[in-house]
Image: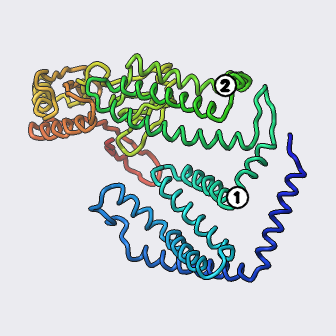
């Protein structure tokens, strides 16, 4: 570290003498009182404005830039009113007395204006955490510049340095790199969203190809942004070889699953085995694929739940894709009747009932076969086709209800097991027979 403590102490002493001289002046307390009064008026004005202004209908007929500006100003009404009061007080005191006697008021006005500008610029960012981080960092830089201490702060932060693998790291360098990375990644996100919207509107691309192109573009933009940001602050990328080696060791030790899921995601997009919109069954989870991410796919179950399944599971496990090459789905319904029924009549009735359903494929005749003479009755299997597997359980339920109504009309009974219980001894001296139906 090459910090000059003598210069730091001299700077602190000079700042202390300047502050002491300012506080000793009676004009300091006048300015401080004006600032407190302006802050109280600004708070009261902010409360009144928010109580009377409807943000949802504010400037609805104005052009978008003006409407956005008006809404930001209303949200920051206290700061705007405070800035106006400070500027007015500064102008009055400038003409009434010496300019140095309103220095604190001028600083307060500049700080308020800087915060308004920062709020207006950061209002286009959606991420609340990034907005707060960028706003506070930018305002601190603006405050140091306003009071004339920006160069001193930069030199002080740059004085602490550590050399790692030929790379000189200082707090100032890390702050610059972090700020540039945030801006570059934000711009990258905007460009990625724009490219994604254009690609998703391309009707000649399949959903899997669209997702693959979006991922490639986003990764390319991210790498480009990082390279540009690091190069802009003077970091030689060749000096990062030690960190690259450490990242490789980390991948070998603890990031295998992340890398495996990433590679599996690319494989799924290339081979098109699954794609957004497919109806799939993976283990006990069934639903429609709503999104394919870098690490996982999202499967919407249709009841409000979404299963986040790692990409590696889709590559290594058995996956049932109901819409891989053909959406036509065969529906199977098993049922039984008693031996009093005519099996040929039962099959004919079942075929007619299935064919009458509105979702049954008209070009494919339903089929019903007798599968077994069981102890409790005759067992049948009814099969018919529908054009889409979505809502297959509802279709089965509708057909079974219609089949039940048809059996009732024709006097065909569905068998149920009968059990005889013989009770001997105990309090009851007589033998009784009870039938229990399941």
Residue position for label 2: 237
**Residue at 60%, 52% in the rendered image:** 133
Q: Earlier in the sequence, mark 2 or mark 1?
A: 1
Q: Is disc 2 surrounded by few (<14), some (14 to 19) or many (20+) residues within 10 Å? A: few
Up/down of 360 relative to 150, above or below:
above
Q: Position of residue 96 (x, y in %)?
A: 60, 82
Q: Is residue 342 visible?
A: no
Quarter of the view holding residue 22: bottom right
Residue 349 position (above or below residue 436) = above
Residue 204 position within the rendered picture, expressed as x and y whole percent measured from the top left: 26, 23
Residue 3 in the figure: left or right of residue 234: right
Which one is nearer the viewer's eye here, 223 or 273? 223
Quadrant of image for the C terminus:
top left
Residue farthest along the right direction in this orientation: 6
Crowd around label 1: few <14 · some 14–19 · many ≥20 (10 Å):
few
Q: Residue at x 28, y 36 (%)?
A: 393
**Is 279 left or right of 345, judged from the image as shown?**
right
Q: CA distance from mark 2 to mark 1?
A: 34 Å
Q: Nearer the viewer, mark 2 or mark 1?
A: 1
Q: Residue at x 51, y 80 (%)?
A: 44
Label 1 element class: loop
Instruction: Kindly identify which residue carries mark 1.
Output: 148
Side (left or right) of 206 relative to 46? left
Q: Is residue 337 left or right of residue 322?
A: left
Residue 259: x, y in percent?
Answer: 58, 24
Quarter occupied by the N terminus = top right
């Amino acid at each position: 570290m090459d910090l000059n403590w003598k210069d730091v102490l001299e700077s602190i002493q000079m700042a202390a003498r300047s502050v002491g001289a300012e506080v000793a002046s009676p004009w300091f307390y006048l300015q401080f009182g004006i600032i407190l009064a302006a802050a109280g008026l600004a708070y009261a004005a902010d409360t009144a404005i928010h109580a009377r202004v409807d943000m949802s209908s504010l400037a609805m007929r104005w052009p978008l830039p003006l409407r956005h500006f008006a809404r930001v100003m209303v949200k920051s009404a206290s700061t705007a009113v405070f800035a106006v009061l400070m500027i007015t007080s500064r102008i009055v005191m400038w003409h009434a007395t010496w300019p140095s006697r309103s220095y604190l008021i001028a600083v307060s006005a500049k700080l308020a204006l800087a915060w308004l500008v920062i709020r207006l610029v950061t209002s286009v960012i959606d991420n609340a955490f990034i907005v707060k981080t960028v706003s506070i960092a930018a305002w601190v830089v603006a405050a140091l510049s306003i009071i004339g201490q920006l160069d001193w702060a930069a030199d002080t932060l740059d004085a602490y340095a550590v050399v790692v693998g030929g790379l000189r790291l200082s707090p100032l360098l890390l702050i610059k790199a972090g700020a540039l990375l945030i801006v570059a990644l934000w711009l990258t996100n905007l460009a990625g969203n724009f490219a994604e919207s254009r690609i998703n509107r391309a009707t000649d691309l399949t959903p899997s190809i669209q997702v693959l192109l979006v991922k490639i573009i986003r990764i390319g933009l991210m790498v480009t942004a990082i390279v540009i940001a690091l190069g802009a602050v003077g970091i030689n990328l060749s000096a990062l070889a030690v960190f690259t080696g450490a990242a490789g060791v980390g991948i070998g030790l603890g990031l295998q699953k992340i890398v495996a899921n990433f590679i599996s995601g690319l494989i799924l997009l290339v081979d098109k085995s699954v794609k957004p919109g497919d109806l799939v069954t993976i283990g006990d989870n069934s639903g429609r694929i709503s999104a394919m991410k870098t690490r996982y796919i999202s499967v919407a179950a249709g009841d409000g739940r979404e299963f986040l399944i790692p990409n590696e599971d889709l590559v290594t496990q058995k996956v049932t894709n109901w819409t891989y090459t053909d959406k036509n789905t065969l529906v199977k319904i098993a049922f039984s009747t008693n031996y009093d029924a005519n099996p040929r009549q039962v099959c004919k009735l079942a075929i007619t009932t299935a064919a009458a359903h509105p979702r049954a494929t008209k070009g494919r005749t339903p089929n019903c076969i007798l599968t077994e003479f069981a102890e409790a009755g005759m067992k049948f299997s009814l099969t018919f086709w529908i054009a889409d597997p979505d809502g297959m359980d509802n279709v089965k339920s509708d057909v079974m209800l219609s089949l039940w109504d048809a059996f009732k009309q024709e006097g065909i009974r569905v068998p149920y097991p009968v059990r005889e219980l013989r009770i001997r001894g105990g309090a009851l001296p007589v033998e009784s027979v009870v039938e229990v139906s399941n």
